[in-house]
Image (cartoon, rainbow, N blue to C red):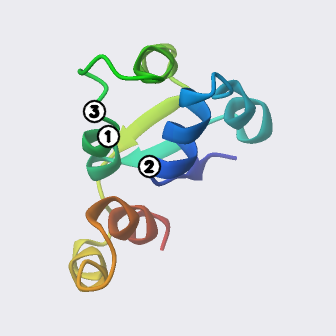
Amino acid sequence: MPVVSNTSPILNLAIIDQLILLQQQFGEILIPSAVLDELKISEERPGSQAIREAISVGWIQSREVTNEPLAQLLKQTLDKGESEAIARTL
């Protein structure tokens, strides 16, 4: 079953070269477009290559938010990536 993630788990595991743990635990990871933007995969940063590879292979996939009004409401107290990840799951 796919899960939805925000930026921190993906980025932090990629930085320490352990991104594979997410795939092993969950299989498929869905991320909203805000999380993809926050990951800044086009820049050469620690972990960027591993994230690009995971997206290329397809076990991390970007999806549109399914509940935009909720995402907008959540953005009042959370950052964009967290808001969209929560709105994507509900």
Q: Is residue 24 left or right of residue 50?
A: right
Query: Can you tell which of label 2 and label 1 is closer to the viewer?
Result: 2
Could you say where residue 10 lies in the image, as x and y percent from the top left? Answer: 53, 40
Q: From the viewer's perspective, is 9 left or right of 44? A: right
Residue that numbered label 2 is attached to: 7
Give yes or no for contact between labels 1 and 3 (Cβ–Cβ under 8 Å). Answer: no
For the residue pair 13 and 58, the one nearer the viewer reads as 13
Q: Which amino acid, mark 1?
A: Leu
SS for dot 3: loop
Q: Residue at x 31, y 25 (%)?
A: 41
Q: Amino acid at mark 3?
A: Lys
Residue 48 percent location from the top left of the image: 40, 21
Estimate the spatial distance between the alpha carbons at disc 2 and disc 1, rounded to whole Å: 8 Å
Report whether 23 appears left or right of 85. right
Q: Which residue is located at x 44 percent, y 23 percent?
A: 46
Number of the label disc, if any, that sits on residue 76: none
Give the residue number, with chain letter if any, for mark 1. 36
Q: Earlier in the sequence, mark 3 or mark 2?
A: 2
Task: Tell me the crowding category of disc 1: few under 14, some 14 to 19, or many 20 or more residues within 10 angstroms, Cα based.
Answer: some
Mark 1 → mark 3, Cα distance in angstroms: 7 Å
Which residue is the site of mark 3? 40
Q: Amino acid at mark 2?
A: Thr
Provide residue 25's location: percent of width, then percent of height.
78, 39
Badge 2 element: helix
